Amino acid sequence: MSVQNVRNAIERFLRDEKPQVLCIRGAWGTGKTYTWDDVLGHLAHHSTKSLAFENYARVSLFGLNSIQEIKREIFQASKPASKIGKEFDPKDLKDLYSTGKSSNLLFKALSVWSENAMDAAIEAANLLARNQLICIDDLERKGADLRSVDVLGYISHLRDVRNCSVALLLNDEELEDKDEFESYLEKVVDLYVRFEPTCQEIADIAVPERERDEVSNLVRTNAVKLGITNVRVIQKILRLVRDLVPMISQYSFQVTKSAAATITLMGWSYLQPEQAQHARSSATRRCRGADHPENRQKTAEGLAQAALYDAWACK
C-alpha cells in the first residue's frame, strides 16, 4: 500500500470514535512510526476535524518482558491529545489523573511506601486508561519473556473493556513467534495495513521537504537509483556526505557528486550488506535473456542498474 493510502487509513482510524485495533505491518526502517506520528500530529494540531480521543500514549515494546511493564510504560507516556508532539511535562500526568473516582486509588497507592507501591500505583493508573488512544510499537523487539499472544490479549482487553483504540506497529517478518502470533491476530485486529512504500517515498520520508538542498537531493537520487528501502540508512548516509562536503568544498561540484555517489553505495553496503548484495545479484540476473523480445525492457533496466553498481564500486 502506498504512503498516501496508509495515511488515509490512519486518518480514518484516528477520527473514528468506535474503539478499534489497527495493525500496521512493514519492513524495518520503512517509516511506519514516522508516518503514524506525522498523521497524528497533523490531526492534533492542524486539522479542522479533531481526534476521536482526548488522551494518548505511545510505547515501544523494545526490551519489555511483561504486561506489567507495558502498563507502566502506558502510564508514564500518557498525555492529553493537545500535548502530542510536545516535550514531556510532569503536569500532563497530574492533569490526566487528577479527576475521577479511580484517581483516589492512584494517589493512595503512591502514598504507601512499600515494596509493591509502584505496582499498586500502576494498577490503579491502569483503571484510568479508558477512552484513550494507544500506539504500541516495536512488537518484534520485545523481551524474550513476553509472548506476542499475551500482548494481543492485553490489546483486546484495552479495546473491549477499557474502550481504547490501539494501533499496533510491527515488522512481522522479524517475529520469533510469528506462527502463534498469526493464529491469534485476526481475532483481535479490526483493520490491517501493509506499509510498502516505494523507494522514492522512502527517500522522501528520510529527507523531508524542509531539509532538502543540493547535497540531500544527491543522496535522495542515488538512494532511489540503488533501491535503498530503509529510512535510517539514507539518513546516516546523508550525515556522512554532509560531514565530507566542507572538506572538498574547494573542488568543483562534480567532485561532490562523485563523492556522494560513492558514499551512498559504500554506506549502504556497510549498513545493509545482505540487501545491497541481493540487489546487485538481481540486477545482474535481469541482464540475462536479452534475446527474448518480451524481456528487452527488463534487460535494459538490469544492465543499467548493474552498470551503476559497477561504476560506483570502482570509484
Image: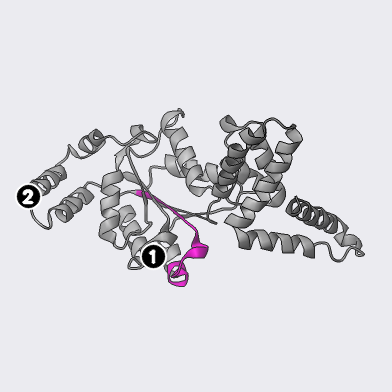
Q: Work out whether residue 187 or residue 44 is closer to the camera in this orientation and state it.
A: 44
Residue under the point 80% across and 57% down:
302
Residue at the disc numbered 1: 148
Residue 229: x and y in percent read 61, 52
| Label 2 packing within 10 angstroms: few (<14), some (14-19), many (20+) | few
Residue 46: x and y in percent read 46, 28
Is residue 170 shown left or right of residue 166? right
**Residue 130 seen by the camera:** no
Residue at the disc numbered 2: 112
Q: Work out whether residue 236 or residue 94 is closer to the camera in this orientation and state it.
A: 236
Labels 1 and 2: the sequence-earlier one? 2
Q: Work out whether residue 131 or residue 206 is closer to the camera in this orientation and state it.
A: 206
Residue under the point 70% across and 37% down:
256
SS class, disc 2: loop
Which residues are the magenta region? 165-182
Residue 69: x and y in percent read 27, 57
SS class, disc 1: helix
Query: In this picture, is 299 found above or below 51?
Result: below
